[in-house]
Amino acid sequence: MNPSEDTLRKLLKEPKKVPTIGRYQIIDTLGRGNMGEVFRARDPMIGRMVALKTRRFDLVYEKKDLRFVIDKFFEEARIAGNLIHPNIVTVFDVGRDGDYCFIAMEMLDGDNLTSHNKEDTLLPPLKVMELVRQVCLALDFAHSRNVIHRDIKPANLMFSRDRIIKITDFGIATLAGNSTADLQVMGTPSYMSPEQTKGLRLTPQTDFFSLGVVFFELLVGRRPFLGRTLFELMENIRYAAAPSILSFNQKLPAALDRIIHRVLEKEPELRYQSGQELAADIEQVMAGKSIPVRDLKATRKADLLKPLDFFKGFSRKEIEELIRHGVFIRYNKSQVIVREGEVDTTFFILLVGRVRVIKNNRKIADLTKGACFGEMGAVNKSPRTAHVVAQEQCIVFKLDLKVLERESPDLKIKFYQVFIETLIHRLEHTTRMLSMQGAAAQAARSHETPKGSAPPGEAVQGETLRPAPEGTPNPEPVE
C-alpha cells in the first residue's frame, strides 16, 4: 500500500470498524502536511473532541535515524505538554500507533492568522498589536520554562471558539541551547531567523524574529523578506535590511516601526531580550505613547561609524538615524558579500576585517577598515563588475540608497554630498594611477623606469586595483 495514501481513506476501507489511531476515533481530516495529517477525533474514554496530529517519520528519515527522531518527538511533546497557559494550546496526550506518532491537543474551532495576512483581509492595527502582545506573553512563559517554539508563523497562531489567540504546534519545540541539527525539521523558511537559516544554536530571540515577520505581515499584508528562490530568500533573511512598515502605510505609528526593526535585527543580542519587554513596548504604542530607544548596542554601532572619514561630517544624531535605516552584517571568512552581475542599490562600508575584490577569478585588491565598495553599482543601478569576498570575519554597514529617498531631505542631501565627494576622490586617485601606469608602460618600452612610477594595474568600480601574484586561489564557495 502506498504509504502516502490518505490515512482516513485507508481506515474507512474497513467499514465494520470505527477508524481509530491509538484510542482516538477519527471523525474527519483537518489538514495534512509532509509527514502526516491532523484529524478531528474523539476520545471515547471521556467523550472529548481533540485535534489529533500525526507524524510519519519513516517517510522522511532513513531507518538508522528513526529511533533518535521518534525519541526526540516524544521528548518535545512532553515539553509542550507541560506548558499550561491561556494563550498556548493544551496538549492532552502523546503516543504511537504502528508507524504513526501522534499528539492529542485541545480542539480549536476558530481560524488562524493566515486569514488576516493579505492586504485585503488585514485586521485593524490596534487589534494586531493586541494579538501580538498576547503572543509575546505566551512566548515569555514558554521561554521561562526553557522552551523555544522554532516555528512561529500565522498558521500556528489560531483563534479559539471565543476568539482567544493561541500558539499551536510545539511539535518541533526545543529546549534552549539545543542544536537545530538534533531534529532536522527546523521551521518554515519564510519565518526563520538568520541563525536558523545557518543551522546555529538557538536562543529565545529566534522566536521574536519569527514573530516580527508575522507582525510585519499582519500590518502591511506582505512579509519583510522575499525571494524568487529559496537561496535568495535565505540570503535576504540573513543580510537584507527589513523595509519600513511606514513605506506601506504612513498612518502606522513611527514607534511601531522602531519596535519591528528592533525585533528583526540580524544579531540575536540586538533584539528584545524577553517577551515581557516586547509586550511592554507594544502596550506603550497602543496607549498612543512614544517609546524610548532601548537598543543597548546603538552607541556601539555609532562608535564604529563616527571615526570613519565618510562620517566625519555627520552629527551623532544623523549617524544614529542612518543606522536605523541600514543594517550591520557579520560575514565569516570566504562568504561572498557582493556577487558579480547582481543589480541592486546597496553599498557597503567595511567596519571590521578585510575583504578581497575578485574579477575573472583573480585577486584585484584587498580592502580594509573604512573602505567603501559597491558605490558605482548602487548609483548607476548597473550590474556589479566584481566579487567581494570576506578574507576573515568582517562586519560591514550596508545601506540601500532607495531608503534614503524616503528620508528627510536634509539628511539625504548631506549623505549624497559626502557620497559624491568620495567618488570624486576615487576618480582623481584612479586618474593619477592610470597616468603613472601609462608612463611606466612607456618607460618599459624604452627600458627606463621613471622615478615614482607605479606598476600596471586594473580599475574596478573606481578602485585602483593591482593584478594578483601567480597562484592566487579562487574564493571558497559559500554554503
Image (tube, helix red, strand yellow):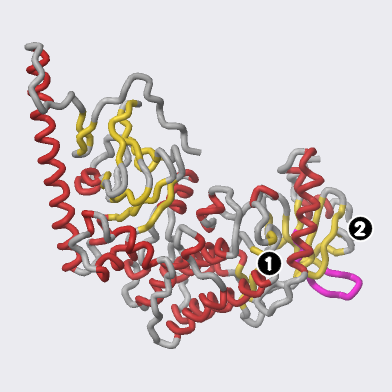
Residue 111 figure quarter: bottom right
Q: Is residue 348 visible?
A: no
Number of numbered discs visible in the structure rendering: 2
Q: Can you give x and y, in whole percent of width and height, for residue 300 in the image? A: 38, 63
On screen, residue 182 versus residue 45, left or right, reads left
Identify the residue at horizontal 83%, vertical 69% (top origin). 42
Q: Can you give x and y, in whole percent of width and height, for residue 348 in the image? A: 30, 49
Q: From mark 1 to mark 2, how far is it between C-alphas?
A: 43 Å
The amino acid type found where label 1 is placed reads Asn
Based on the picture, tell me whether residue 50 belongs to the magenta stretch: yes
**Mark 1 or mark 2, which has the lower sequence index?**
2
Give the position of the N terminus as an image quadrant. Answer: top right
What span is in magenta?
A: 42-53
Would you say the magenta stretch is mainly helix, strand or loop?
Answer: strand
Identify the residue at horizontal 58%, vertical 78% (top origin). 134
Q: Can you give x and y, in whole percent of width and height, for residue 107 in the image? A: 73, 72
